[in-house]
Amino acid sequence: MNTETQTETWNDRFGASLMRSLTPPKVMLERGQGCRVWDVDGKEYLDFLAGIAVNSLGHAHPVLVEAIADQAAKLVHVSNYFATPPQLELAERLKRITGAGDAGRVYFGNSGAEANEAAFKLARLNKGADGRKTRILALKQGFHGRTMGALALTGKPALQEDFLPMIPGVDHVDTTIEALEHAIDDTVAALILEPIKGEAGVVDLPDGFLAAARRLTEEHGALLILDEIQTGVGRTGSWFAFQHLGVVPDAITIAKGIAGGFPIGALVTFGRASELFSAGQHGSTFGGNPLGTRVANAVLGEIEDAGLVDAALVKGERIRAGIAAIASPLVEEIRGRGLLIGVGLHRPVAAAISAAALERGLIVNAPNEASLRIAPPLIVSDAEIDEFLSILAQSMAAVEGADQETSA
Ligand SMILES: Cc1ncc(COP(=O)(O)O)c(C=O)c1O
């Protein structure tokens, strides 16, 4: 079939049938293998977005394929009236890799937003002896999802304004120790934040901020809840980002990369936070189903066996050094850790670079006008990183050239 006909056909069908809440995509993908995907016209792309930090093992990894097929043939869904072996195994595994240990507990949902909804309810349960704890603090520019609870936690007024009123009791603070000191008091039930703000363009917390957050939440009896949905599962070079930041939280939320693309989310509690929920207070029909939990066990097992957590740091360094070596005048700074990298740009040309890359067969994301986000599968090879750097350099050069022509 002729390329134009294919593209026109699916564009029209998408426009006619998908909810307008979605921005129409430019490409329709048909299959993937490793770090590569192919569109319906057969064009190949190197995938340095991994479904937004989701496809930890890349595409069609045999471990993932086998786990889905084998479990699908055994037991897909049973409801929360029954326990299943993969569900227990995953809960125990998460307690181990988070370090929550014996005092930890795990709740399973089906997405990041759902994990954060559970965290929101956890915060509401931390009422304090006199019931005064009614406030939750979150960070400006933080992102926690699109459902109403998760949206209330999200510090981006532009995403909220069409859906007011928000669930009350959430205050957003600037990401400075002073702002946090000023905002926190004994009426605060919880502080929720991302260890690296992913959707904001992979923005690191200031030095000492997380330690101060831990100290202040402890002083005021508030829970410290970390949204590790984008930073978790090995991507930043430790299982979870808090582990290299030297702070132990009261709870974390996990989703995205945990099952390599199969939808599942989790809330993991530490210590006293594990005692807050009681029977019947929360649940989800699909949450913790045997298929999703089996796939997550397989993916986490492979990440561990293949040493992909430590490798994420080394590969991340190769990418960072390579971007620095491109020496593009567009690049202002390189942020993030391991295989979650943000490139801050001097000018609002991120979308133009991303489009130029797409044309050249590279998927790299622009979460905002002045940032690129780089989040390849954890299995990415050195050769693929070098190919990525070469296409990125060409794409940046094309945009620099176009920029100069416009300003000339
Ligand atoms: C840090 C963070 N929290 C929550 C979410 C929401 O996850 P989901 O889209 O699975 O609901 C995202 C998604 O991008 C995220 O990056």
Image (spheres, rainbow, N blue to C red):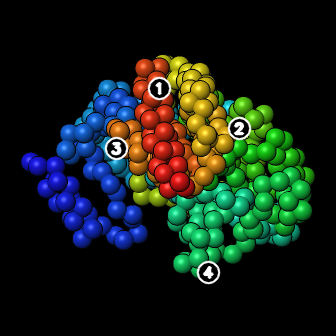
Say which label, 1 or 4, has the lower sequence index: 4
Q: Residue furthest bottom?
A: 165
Q: In this view of the protein, which residue sits in the foreground, 26 or 73?
A: 26
Please provide percent x and percent y for residue 60: 31, 32
Give me the disc on residue 351.
none
Classify residue 75 by image quadrant: top left
Task: Give the Cα distance between marks 3 and 4.
Answer: 41 Å
Residue that label 2 marks: 242
Question: Are the residues flagged by discs 3 and 4 in contact, CB closer than 8 Å?
Answer: no
Residue that label 4 marks: 165
Neighbour tally class for label 4: few under 14, some 14-19, many 20 plus, Cα within 10 Å: few
Please provide percent x and percent y for residue 45: 33, 37
Question: Are the residues flagged by discs 2 and 4 in contact, CB closer than 8 Å?
Answer: no
Task: Give the Cα distance between marks 2 and 4.
Answer: 33 Å
Query: The disc labelled 3 sits on which kind of residue?
Result: Glu
Which is in the foreground here, disc 3 or disc 4? 3
Please provide percent x and percent y for residue 278: 64, 57
Above or below — where is 75 with respect to 170? Answer: above
Give me the disc on residue 359.
3
Say which label, 3 or 1, has the lower sequence index: 3
Q: Is residue 267 visible?
A: no
Give me the disc on residue 385.
1
Q: Is residue 14 visible?
A: yes
Query: The disc labelled 1 sits on which kind of residue?
Result: Ile
